[in-house]
Amino acid sequence: MPRDKTIKSFPSAVRRVQLPRERLRSFAKRLHSLHRVPSSPPPAVDSINVVCISDTHGLQPPIPPGDLLLHAGDLTQWGTFNEIQAQLTWLSRQPHKYKVVIDGNHDLFLDEDFRQQHPERWKQALDAAAVGNSNKEVDIKTAKDLDWGDIIYLQDSSAALPFPSHSRTINIFGSPLTPRHGLSSFHYNRGTDVWTGSVPANTDILLTHGPPWGHLDSIRDGVKKSGCAFLAKELSRVQPRLVVYGHIHVGYGQEEQVYDSVGRAYEAIIGGWGGWKDLTLMAWSLWLHWLLPQKWERAHQRTTFVNAAVVEGFEEYKVKNEAAAVSI
């Protein structure tokens, strides 16, 4: 008797396979949604007003007044000397007491090692910048020829900014590094840890070009993350008051992270360096929080994350977002 070759359908057998790390993150997100964090206190009278911008790509949008102006890189479109100088001149004219700048992956001129290793990429940038420009640049200038005015330039370095009228000094660390994507400057290979131990423990403000993992770094529907987990882990260690970056234009915005035991464990799980032990810690801490809310809701270190990218688009850039303002 011939066998029945009819193909039967079993729709109930089709199911989503979830990997252990995905399950862990899913449980962590559920627990974190139950975490009651005290609302942010109002700004103090002697707060320092910080204005944040990034990814101007040769454009010069309006900048509001403040005490400190930060630019998180990608000053230019092609990264040539003339482009960078034009942006530095514009920034140095701003009235803020301090102006601090780092590079981005588009600012090729300031990455001399990259230009020497990839002369064809540098020539491509020079040619592209010359389109529609009668004054083609001659590749003979160096970074020493730039006029920085009163701008403070950081490249994997720190600066201490005194504010005598506020009786405070703000320590800021700046780095242009971003995970590799394409062939651009100040890149490192994904999966390479360039961050652990790199940020001084007394840092109040961290200024980077690329975002940390999980903080305003989504490039599609909140799903695909492009930030660096090693940077996120370093931030969990240092816990600066403010982190400013750009690079991912669609990630523009602000958010806060409270680094109590729940927040630290959540960061570890989402960033990928934590495990089920951290999930247990989250659950235990939440239980204590609900049991002893008054004792638990004491002041914890808060970090404000700002993705300050002001443009949208690719190559055909246009200003979409306002400069971000934060009081610390």
Image (cartoon, rainbow, N blue to C red):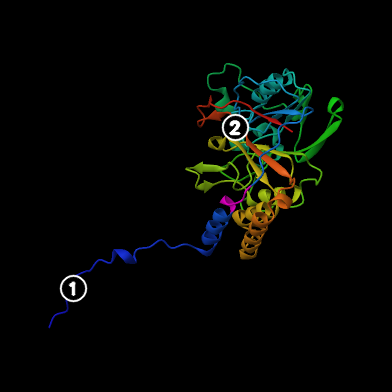
Q: Position of residue 201 (x, y in %)?
A: 80, 47
Q: Residue at x 54, y 59 (%)?
A: 27
**What span is in magenta?**
32-36
- Residue situated in front as seen by the camera: 314 or 220: 220
**Residue 296, horizontal then vertical, whole percent:** 71, 52
Question: Can residue 185 be seen in this snapshot?
Answer: yes
**Magenta-span inclusion, residue 30:** no
The answer to the question of whether label 1 and label 2 lie on touching residues, with beta carbons closer than 8 A, is: no
Taking the spot 63% from the left edge, 42% from the top edge, the residue there is 211
Residues 281 and 127: in front is: 281
Query: Quadrant where the C terminus lies?
Result: top right
Q: Quadrant of residue 126?
A: top right
- Say which amino acid is labelled 2: Ala
Dot 1: within a 10 Å radius of its alpha carbon, few (fewer than 14), some, or many (20 or more) residues? few
Q: Residue 95 in the image: state x and y as whole percent.
A: 74, 18
The image shows residue 287, relative to residue 306, as above or below, that is below
Secondary structure at numbered mark 1: loop
Horizontal and vertical percent for residue 96?
A: 75, 22
In the image, is 41 to the left or to the right of 249?
right
- The disc at residue 5 is 1
Q: Nearer the viewer, residue 243 or 107?
A: 243
- For the residue labelled by badge 2, is the local secondary structure a helix, a strand or a loop? loop
Give the numbered dot on residue 309: 2
Please tell me which residue is depicted at 59% across the width and 25% down the height of the picture.
Answer: 322
